[in-house]
Image (cartoon, rainbow, N blue to C red):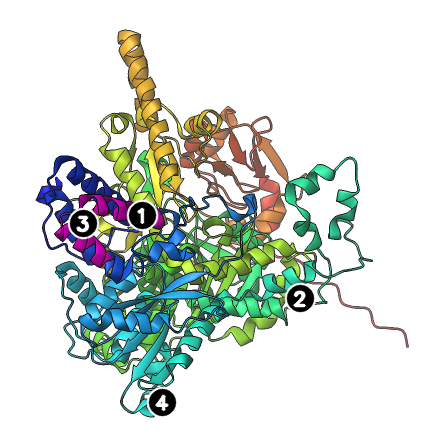
Amino acid sequence: MSKDAIPAQKRIDQFFSGPGARADSWRDLVEAAKAWARDQNRTGYDAALAELSVTEEFHGYPGLQLMSALREAASAGDAATSVSLAMRIAQALTTKSFRQHAGDWNLHDEGNGDIPDLLPPTFGHKEAHRPYFETLIVTGVPSNNWPALATEWRNLRRPIDAFVYEPVIVGSLEDAFCAALLNADLAAVVINEGFALRSRHNAPILRSFTNAMGEHEASDVSALKLAQILKRIRPELDIYLMSNRDVEEMAGNPEANVARRIFYSVEEILELHLSILEGIQDRYDTPFFDNLKKYAQRPIGTFHALPIARGKSIFKSDWIRDMGEFYGPNLFLAESSATTGGLDSLLEPTGNIKSAQDKAARAFGADRVFFVTNGTSTSNKMAVQALLSPGDIAIVDRNCHKSHHYGMVLAGAQPLYVEAFPMTEYSMYGAVPLKTIKQALLNARADGRLNRVKMVDLTNCTFDGHIYNTRRVMEECLAIKPDLIFLWDEAWFGFARFSPFLRPRTAMGAANDIEAWMHDPKSIASYEKQRAELGKNPSDDLLLKTRLIPDPRQIRLRVYQTNSTHKSMSAIRQGSMLFVKDVEFHTVEQQFKEAVFTHASTSPNQQLIASLDVARRQMELEGYGLVANAMEIALAIRQAVNNNPLISKYFRILDASAMVPAAYRQTGFVDYLAPGANWALALKSLQDDEFCLDPTRMTLVCGTAGFDGTQFKGILASQYGIQVNKTSRNSVLLQSNINNTRSDVAHLIRVLSEIASEVDRGLAQGGANAKKTFETRVKSLMQDVPNLPNFSHFHPSFRGDAGSKTNEGDIRTGFYAAYDAVGCEFIRLSDPEIDRRLKAGPELVSANFVIPYPPGFPIMVPGQVITQETIDFMRKLDVKEIHGYDAKEGLKLVRTEALAKIGKPRPAAAPKLKAAS
């Protein structure tokens, strides 16, 4: 669209726009100003400035004064001033220099013409700076008084303040809502009474968005109502209520707990200022990291088993001094095996680690948090071990991470595997349909074994980006068994807490929503209404078809979530957290301590613990903007790849409609970038659809360019320095995160364009034979794909006490059967004996886990009967990495004779001898 065609009144509610889009808008304004100065036609500039002005109202910088100056320069026909001022503002926004450089706020830069420091502070000396944030002021004061109000707030600043903030003033509920969504720098909100409901601007999508969130036309525009709305979309914000009514009554209202503090509006403005700073300090504090820094600066004599502590053995060495020079002294000064002297014990934290974990619980909406320093593999095993006992049944996604399977072995629990929907064309699985999970529960009930089903264990989101409707899954399962435990492996999804769109689909987000629903009196009425409609003994078929509502009086809400903090936040590798929201936690607390003792190292890495503490701080203070940027980066990549004529000839990124079958997209949502898409439509999908696609996870199909996933991953890494996440037979997975920039996008697109050009050139120059070879290769990768094998069943020897309708098995006994070398045999995959036994028996029973990468899930588990489907898949695999399988030896199987022994009842234990008198 040309600048002249831009409508004068911009809509403020196109929420796909993020930090990058804002920067682009300012660059467009600069170009329009230069065009005006060059061509003497300011029509395009006026349109661009009008478009920009609307959303800039929701940001502290450039602020009212500089925006007025831009408009005044345009009105005066002063192109030169317009160019100069627009360039200054655009540069300040790009470099973020306005946060520290006072001259950026002035109409005329008062002599400081230095180029802002673009290097990280470790690359040179830099003065300590005060972190900058912005505070939203919602007021009923007329807009012509806002400049004076902003000045009054600025006058509260003191040199001794640890932080500096700029006020952002709005006058309506809708504008406050927009500011909270669009301004990632907001960290606090002050809500006065007397503001309006409607925005001064055009916002139809905003209204459908607020309606979708349950905030309908309500005439209630009270400060408390707005506080509740803002807390739902930005729970990390500190909210302060200013009331000129009975503040005592408001303070005693349980609904007012969304506010950090309530003030009487005509008094104590300095106290409000200090409260805002204190709230930021509370989030900024990192108890363990702060104490570790202090510890590192103390003179310490070390007489314990850690020679590397204090670094003397490093820096005094002629041979390994380069290690010290590379890492710097602080790493070694902060190393210790001690848990005293300002430090704490990860095994039984009572000091600053405990405080750090409590802050993490607040940040992520949990009741408590465990820091884990050897990855989410350990978090998963800890949870399974603590929550399940031998003989307990757990409904488990067969395609989950191997740590869940090994956790079942450790606990002696019996996995009842359920299957995800297949995506055969791309050699990957999606997620487990809710109907499948409900059927497993109903089968267990029919078998009289529902009491033994203790847990539902699922992966959210999946490796490839499939997100469950976590609330619906838990509610419908709780309607069948109200005390079920849910373990959600959100290794890849930890960042989602800080997106208002994705948060409700996280385990903790959904658990908090369910908890709030349980306390709503309407919940009992909803349950009773459905119970009457279903009748006394509804059939399983009816229950499977119905969106079940649990009895809120019977629910025992028990939800656990693990996430790999290092995968999506600024934590060191292997940093993980385990979140707990469990009303029965007191009954398993000791078991969790034992699980910690079992799995946690007695010598955890101090820097890793500190990084978990710091990652929490960052996400609470700037996570919203970082996640919004990661999502924007992903959308930019999708658009650039799929809309580029050359790249899209050979590559494409699969959209939501390709990744999620229509049957699970009940709203009809197609994709984030489909024509007419906006966040209101996306929110509707995220609320109602059974599965959604994480926008930050991008499946790039490379088979259409003649590359298999492993081959293409190697080319990107070795020739272009690009690392990708995982591969399938004909695709690679790209993942955007809080570390990515627009430069990363540009590099990726340039590389894909270069590779596409090479493919294009090779086909053009190679003639008919090259084209035929290419087409054969593409057909092999895209069409001649092996069917994905489902889990078959456990051999009867490992199903001694199983039900007739359920498929669980004793995986622990199967696992240890492999320890009996005499009781196992090996048969090569190509051996005709495999085919003979598949037809005539005896059955082939796997002795171990077999996990090919890709796709990365176990196609065989210990005790599983191997079928023709699994063998066909194995024989068609062309991957190099298969855990649990040695091609030279063949498949490791449990011998028939050994199976017979396992299946027999064990003899009774010999009677104990009595002690001699």
Dot 4 or dot 1: first in sequence order is 1
> To which residue does mark 4 refer?
252
Residues at circles 3 and 4 in contact by the CB criterion of under 8 Å:
no
753 relative to 576 in the view: left or right: left
* Depth check, front residue: 781 or 807: 781
Mark 4 residue type: Gly
Q: Cα distance, mark 4 to mark 1?
A: 49 Å
Say if the magenta span includes residue 83. yes
* Depth check, front residue: 247 or 5: 5
Mark 3 residue type: Ala
Q: Which residues are magenta?
A: 67-92
Query: Dot 1, how many residues are within 10 Å of its Cα: few (below 14), some (14-19), or many (20+)?
Result: some
> To which residue does mark 1 refer?
88
> To which residue does mark 2 refer?
344
Residue found 59% across the figure and 39% down from its top? 895
SS type, badge 3: loop
Dot 1 or dot 2: first in sequence order is 1
Mark 2 residue type: Asp
User: In this rendering, is residue 821 above or below 247?
Assistant: above
Q: Cα distance, mark 1 to mark 3?
A: 34 Å
Q: Cα distance, mark 1 to mark 2?
A: 48 Å
SS type, badge 4: loop
Residues at circles 1 and 2 in contact by the CB criterion of under 8 Å:
no
SS type, badge 1: helix
Q: Closer to us: mark 4 or mark 1? A: 1
- Dividing the picture into quarters, in which one does residue 43 lie? top left
Dot 1 or dot 3: first in sequence order is 1
> To which residue does mark 3 refer?
677
Q: In which quadrant of the rendered image does the C terminus lie?
A: bottom right
